[in-house]
Amino acid sequence: MYYKFSGFAQRLVGATAATAYTPQRSDGLPVHLKLGYPDKLLYRTTMALTIGGTIYCLVALFIASQPKKQK
């Protein structure tokens, strides 16, 4: 019996010899999008948070670089 690791269920599942020795399909998708919708959701959330954080940091740096006005 052959086994392979199920990335979605996080456990070992039974498999054929061919799938056990070649677990990655060559369908042209990047590794971080192989599982479909859950991977796309995590990827897009990460990208949105990264871009939002970068914009927030740039705005904060711009505000901090302005001289304080004297009364």
Image: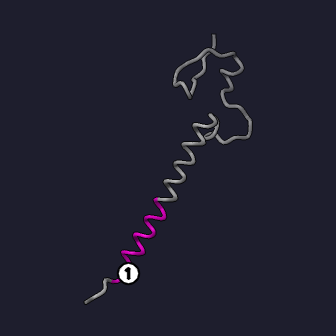
The residue under the point 73% across, 35% down is: 26
Q: Please tell me in which quadrant of the rendered image residue 41 appears.
A: top right
- Tell me the SS state at disc 1: loop
Residue placed farthest to the left in the image?
71
Judging depth in this view, the residue of 69 and 64 nearest the camera is 69
The correct choice, above or below, for 2 with respect to 69 in the image is above
37 sits left or right of 62 in the view: right
Magenta segment: 53-67
Judging depth in this view, the residue of 18 and 31 nearest the camera is 31
Question: Which quadrant is the N terminus positioned in?
Answer: top right
Residue placed farthest to the bottom in the image?
71
The correct choice, above or below, for 19 with respect to 66 in the image is above
Number of marks drawn: 1
Q: Decide whether the magenta segment is chiefly helix, strand or loop.
A: helix
1 sits left or right of 9 in the view: right
The correct choice, above or below, for 2 with respect to 51 in the image is above
The residue under the point 31% across, 86% down is: 69
Residue placed farthest to the front in the image?
71
